């Protein structure tokens, strides 16, 4: 387009402002002086084209399935294959969770996702003193390979992919999974799935760390190396913004901190001597889907574009599969309200729709009752049905990136990208991700954003339906999940039987091998596998690491 | 002489690391003019009682989101009582179902604040229940 065309456009815009807009505003002023997103980002009244050049389109958006992937990683979007509907589940004993998985598969779910209980996440066995009261509360308890055998019993591990939300003890839990598959004769190269294994966001947000950052990063790099060699279909890490957002960050912080973590993992793997194109295609991401519809969509689109640039330009990756970002999405737990919980169905639907329009590869939709307790079966079904309605009834999966070209969405995408690059520079100035963690940089940024958000609600600058507006006295009774009251005894009995019947001499010797490996610099995965196969417990293995690596204490920041 | 400030210990018992609520509340109490001590994560009941004693607080605020509240909160209330801190106001927040709230109150927790509680409500509850000597 010529300069003449542009000036004609600007002239028309100005005329509109001075006539139609002015008249409307004088007849009816706007509802607020300023409009902001969930992340307090100011939003303009109207977005109009900023560019009339096909070159800009090709550079910034391009075509789906091609660099820089702004419009998605598949050339045909969801016309080829819908996203994977993957509901995160886990509670109580391995038996109970196994039953829930079978139910979800019968209901049309297409992938498994395992939640572990707190003791497991911290590398404690169920009967450890630190585990008091925590058994099975927010996930399934796995203390040894025997529990994993029960958990996976009858599940088609070679046909569905399995995601495991586990971080500090990721290598050990993954080894238990692989050991069960080995025992069932399923080839390792056929195993598909993901371990979260993202320790950096634990220091930044979720705080389920055990060891100091450096030995933790070494264990993560061990799993990346092992997976690259032996499990080509396994995502050895799911670099997660979800928890950063839940801790209170803005959308742009979620984007920037997550991708910054991703860059750090790539650096460590390259340092280990791995070829970037050998491991990068198996890096996966995990984002939050919060309430602010367009800001979320812009976040996913910006994430793909930034990652493609980083991998190609900064790390020199040559394989296009290394450039493209695949991600899982979960709707925002922190957005759910305990008041009028049925309203959460509507929130989840809006959030899920944003994830789909943002091009997610898989999706978990939260259940309406999660601000109150673990989800009941009925609530989980409604959440899964929400995804199925989006997929089959809404029509949004019929075309690729339906919002591409929206003046608003494209400009928000650019803004999000620019903010992320600014943050990368700030972190670099602090000496990188690890020093920034130790300095409490991310933690402070998140705490500030969380406080601002709460303040906006408290002062009613932000309306939360059913909480600070439209509240009712009426209490809705929703069914709450009851767990097997005998679960703890079942689990501890199994654990004691394992300790009694295994070859305790072999366990001792494997743990000694593990200690030597931890002190040295060889990959720990093969020795962990040997130890779990002898039924060494999770805590026995993690205690060796605690002893060798030490435990991390953070500076508490308000 | 200016009145002394209300002293509050904000603590995270249990294993969960979800500290968003604890931090937001800690900051709101501080902004409301209280002196706030935040323990950080993974505090055992013993550690919490020890900190409450050492810091000579008027209020103990407990934040827990893992579901282990029924196992941990009554123990903390009991231990505070045993340590002659019966006068200390104990408040809790987190994902706590209604049916548990009654039981916690019987066990000595003075108030339980659910998700969505305005921070001002917590401030008001504390200022109206603490008498400074």
Image (spheres, rainbow, N blue to C red):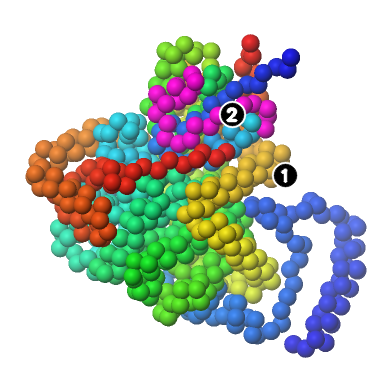
Residue A256 drawn at (x, y percent): 55, 60
Q: Which residue is mark 2?
A: B36
Residue B64 drawn at (x, y percent): 46, 34
Residue closest to the eye, A420 or A510: A510
Instruction: Count the labels in the image.
Output: 2
- Relative height, residue A253 to residue B92 (above, below): below
Instruction: Tell whether A305 sits left or right of A29.
Output: left
Chain holding disc 2: B
B38 falls in the magenta region: yes
Residue A462: name its quadrant.
Answer: top right
Instruction: Tell whether A214 sits left or right of A417.
Output: left
A231 falls in the magenta region: no
Q: Which residue is mark 1?
A: A461
- Relative height, residue B130 to residue A139 (above, below): above
- Relative height, residue A80 to residue B103 (above, below): below
| Crowd tier of the residue under label 2, counting other residues whose Cα lies within 10 Å: few below 14, some 14–19, many 20 or above | many
Residue A190 visible (yes or no): no
For the record, the magenta segment spans B31-54
Residue A507 drawn at (x, y percent): 13, 46
| Crowd tier of the residue under label 1, counting other residues whose Cα lies within 10 Å: few below 14, some 14–19, many 20 or above | few
């Amino acid at each position: 387009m010529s300069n003449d065309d542009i000036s004609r456009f600007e002239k028309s815009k100005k005329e509109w402002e001075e006539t139609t807009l002015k008249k409307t505003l004088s007849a009816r002023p706007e509802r607020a002086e300023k409009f902001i997103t969930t992340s307090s980002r100011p939003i303009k009244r109207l977005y109009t084209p900023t560019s009339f050049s096909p070159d800009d389109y090709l550079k910034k958006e391009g075509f789906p399935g091609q660099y820089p992937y702004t419009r998605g990683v598949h050339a045909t979007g969801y016309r080829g294959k819908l996203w994977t509907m993957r509901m995160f589940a886990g509670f109580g004993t391995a038996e109970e969770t196994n039953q829930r998985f079978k139910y979800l598969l019968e209901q049309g779910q297409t992938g498994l996702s395992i939640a572990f209980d707190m003791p497991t996440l911290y590398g404690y066995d169920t009967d450890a003193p630190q585990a008091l009261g925590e058994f099975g509360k927010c996930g399934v308890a796995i203390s040894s390979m025997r529990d994993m055998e029960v958990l996976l019993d009858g599940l088609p591990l070679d046909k569905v992919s399995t995601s495991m939300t586990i971080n500090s003890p990721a290598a050990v839990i993954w080894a238990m999974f692989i050991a069960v598959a080995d025992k069932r004769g399923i080839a390792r190269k056929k195993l598909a799935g993901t371990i979260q294994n993202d320790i950096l966001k634990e220091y930044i947000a979720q705080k389920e760390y055990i060891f100091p950052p450096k030995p933790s990063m070494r264990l993560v790099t061990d799993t990346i190396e092992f997976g690259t060699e032996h499990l080509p279909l396994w995502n050895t890490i799911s670099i997660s913004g979800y928890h950063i957002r839940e801790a209170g960050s803005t959308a742009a912080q979620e984007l920037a901190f997550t991708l910054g973590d991703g860059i750090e993992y790539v650096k460590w793997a390259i340092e280990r001597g791995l070829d970037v194109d050998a491991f990068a295609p198996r890096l996966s991401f995990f984002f939050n889907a919060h309430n602010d519809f367009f800001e979320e969509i812009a976040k996913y689109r910006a994430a793909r574009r930034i990652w493609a640039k980083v991998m190609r330009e900064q790390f020199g990756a040559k394989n296009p599969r290394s450039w493209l970002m695949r991600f899982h999405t979960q709707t925002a737990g922190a957005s759910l309200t305990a008041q009028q919980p049925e309203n959460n169905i509507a929130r989840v639907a809006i959030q899920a729709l944003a994830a789909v329009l943002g091009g997610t590869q898989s999706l978990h939709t939260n259940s309406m009752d999660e601000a109150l307790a673990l989800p009941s079966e009925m609530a989980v079904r409604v959440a899964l049905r929400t995804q199925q309605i989006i997929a089959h009834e809404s029509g949004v999966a019929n075309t690729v990136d339906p919002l591409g070209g929206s003046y608003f969405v494209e400009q928000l995408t650019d803004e999000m990208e620019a903010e992320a690059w600014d943050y990368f520079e700030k972190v670099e100035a602090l000496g990188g991700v690890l020093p920034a963690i130790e300095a409490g940089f991310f933690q402070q940024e998140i705490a500030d954003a969380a406080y601002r958000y709460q303040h906006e609600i408290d002062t009613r600058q932000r309306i939360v339906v059913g909480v600070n507006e439209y509240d009712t006295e009426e209490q809705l009774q929703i069914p709450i999940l009851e767990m097997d009251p005998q679960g703890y005894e079942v689990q501890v009995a199994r654990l004691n039987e394992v300790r009694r019947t295994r070859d305790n001499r072999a366990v001792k010797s494997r743990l000694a091998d593990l200690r030597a490996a931890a002190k040295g610099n060889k990959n720990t995965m093969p020795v962990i596998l040997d130890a779990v196969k002898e039924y060494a417990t999770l805590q026995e293995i993690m205690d060796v690491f605690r002893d060798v690596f030490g435990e991390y204490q953070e500076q508490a920041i308000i | 002489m200016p009145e002394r400030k209300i002293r509050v210990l904000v603590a995270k018992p249990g294993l969960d690391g979800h500290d968003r609520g604890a931090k937001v509340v800690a900051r709101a109490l501080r902004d409301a003019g209280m002196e706030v001590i935040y323990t950080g994560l993974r505090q055992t009941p013993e550690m919490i009682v020890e900190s409450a004693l050492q810091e000579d607080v008027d209020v103990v605020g407990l934040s827990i989101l893992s579901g282990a509240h029924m196992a941990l909160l009554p123990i903390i209330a009991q231990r505070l009582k045993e340590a002659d801190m019966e006068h200390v106001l104990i408040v809790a927040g987190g994902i706590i179902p209604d049916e548990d709230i009654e039981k916690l109150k019987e066990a000595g927790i003075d108030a339980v604040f659910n998700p969505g509680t305005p921070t001002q409500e917590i401030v008001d509850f504390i200022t109206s229940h603490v008498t400074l000597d």
